Amino acid sequence: MKSIKYILFLITLLYKTGANAQQPAHSYPEPSTTTNVITIYTPNNTPVTAYEWASGEWTEEYKDSIKSYWLNAYNSITFIDEATCKYNCHAYAWAGRTNIMIYMDQVTKYWSPLDKSYIEVSDPSIATHVYYGVRDHSAKTTATSNYFESKWGPDCLFYHHKDDSPYLTDDLHYYVRTPTITGAKVVCTSGTQFTVSSNVPSGYTWTCSSNLTAGAASGYSKTFSAANGSVSAAGWVAVNFGGATVKYDVWVGAPPALTDIYSENGTYCEAGTYTDWIVSNCSSSSNVYFSAYDNEEGVSGDIINTWCSGNYGYGSIYFSEPGNYYVSAWSSNACGNNSSNPIWYSHGNPNPYIFRVYSYSLSFNPKTNEIEIEFDSGQSAKSASANNQFTVTILDNNNTARSQNSYSGKNFAVPVSSLSDGTYDVKISDGNMTATKQLVIKR
C-alpha cells in the first residue's frame, strides 16, 4: 500500500513541477466542500471575487499523511500549518486570509495597471510577495534570502527555499507594496516638497524631469523647483528602487494658455437660464475663470461652479438679461495666470463671436384669433431688431407643422384661426437661433 502511495506521490510531484495543477499526492478521496462567493478588495480598493469556505475538510489521517509526504520529499522545508481545503496560496499570500480561495484570474488584480497596489521589482532582496507566473502559485518572502512561506494547493503551509517546492521557478515575479508620493501638483521657482511613503524600500533614489531642479532632502522628503529658464510644461518627480519606478506627475510653472471654449447649449440661450461652458488645455492643478459681458447693454452673466478636471475646465453662466455677450476664459495656478491672454468664444471664427441671449413672450388672444409674440425691449437693436426676419412654425402634438410663416420686427402677431383648441409648440427661428415654447389655444 505504501509503495502505491509513493508512486502516486511521484506522479503528482512530476505533474505539479511541469504544470499549473495543485493536486495533493495521495490516494484518499477529496472531501466534498461548499463555498460562498464573496467580494474582497485589494489595498487600493479594487474588487476581487473570492470563495469563502463553508463546509468540507480533509480527515485528520490525511492531514498527517500528506504532511509526512512533503517533509520526506524536501528535507529543508519547515511545517507551518496543516493541510486544509479552506484556503489556497493566493489567499494566504495576497489577502492574508485562511478561509477563502482566490484564483489566477483574480489574483493578478493586485498588481494590475489599473490598481497598482503592488509593483514588480527586479531585486528579490526587497520583495515581499512572489508570483510564480504560469505555474499559478503565490508566496510570501521572509527575512531570509530566497526563503518563502507558501501553501501548496490544498495541502500544508510550509517555510521553504524557493527551489524546494513542487513548483518550478522558471517564471518568478517579485513584488512590493507600491509606495506613494504626495505633494503639490504645481511646482514653481520657489520649490515644492514631495514625500514618499515610509514603505518605500531602502536605497531608493529621487529623480525628476528635465524642467525641474532637485533640492534638499530630509527623511522621506525632497524639494524640487522649476529649473531656470524652463517654460510652463508638464513634469514629474519619481522614486526608483529595485528596478522599479513610481512617478508623480506635476505641472511646472504658470498654467498653459487655454485652447478652446464652447457652450454645451449651442450659440444662444434664453434669458433666465444657465449655460454650461467647457475650455480645453486646463490642467487639473489650475483654476479656471469665465467672463461674459455685453458691451452695449453693460450687463454681465453670473459665473458659478468653475473647476478643472483632466485636460478640461468647466463652468456655468447664468444670463439674467438678454443681449449679445462676449465670453472669455483664462486659468491660474500657484505660479501665475494667463489672464492677459484669455481664450475668447469664437464659434470657429477668427474673431470673438457673439453669444446671443434672447427673451420673448407669446400669448394667445382669443379676440383676434392670433398668437402675439413680443421680444424683450432690451433687444430692440439686437436679436429682434426691425430688420430681423423670423420664421414661425406651429407644431401639433404629433410634431406636424400646422402653420409656417415669416415675420419681421420685435413684435408681431401670428393668425391661428384655422387651428382648433389644444396645445401646440411654437418654434421661432431667425437663421441663427431657434427657440420653442409651448402654447395652449383655448377660445
Image (spheres, grey):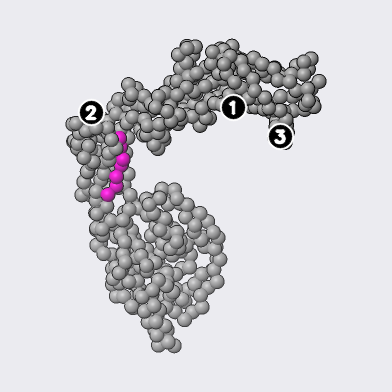
Q: Nearer the viewer, mark 3 or mark 2?
A: 3
Q: For marks 3 and 2, give the CA distance.
A: 66 Å
Query: Label 1 belongs to which residue?
Result: 434
The secondary element bearing badge 1 is classed as strand
Asked whether, in this view, residue 382 is left or right of residue 195, the answer is right
Return the x and y of residue 285 as percentages of the image width and height.
35, 33
Return the x and y of residue 52 as percentages of the image width and height.
51, 60
Q: Could you tell me which quadrant the C terminus lies in?
A: top right
Residue 279 picture quarter: top left
What residue lies at 31% left-to-right and 66% top-to-bottom?
171
Residue type at mark 1 is Thr
Q: For marks 1 and 2, give the CA distance.
A: 52 Å
Query: Label 3 belongs to which residue?
Result: 400
The secondary element bearing badge 3 is classed as loop
Asked whether, in this view, residue 241 is left or right of residue 54, the answer is left
Q: Main secondary structure of the magenta part?
A: strand
Q: Residue furthest right?
A: 443
- Check if residue 269 falls in the magenta segment: no
What residue lies at 21% left-to-right and 40% top-to-bottom?
210
Q: What stretch is highlighted in magenta?
A: 245-251
Query: Label 2 belongs to which residue?
Result: 190
Residue type at mark 2 is Ser
Foreground residue, 23 or 111?
Answer: 111
Return the x and y of residue 338 as percentages of the image width and height.
32, 25
- Check if residue 249 falls in the magenta segment: yes
Tell which circle, 3 or 2, labels the residue nearer the N-terminal end: 2
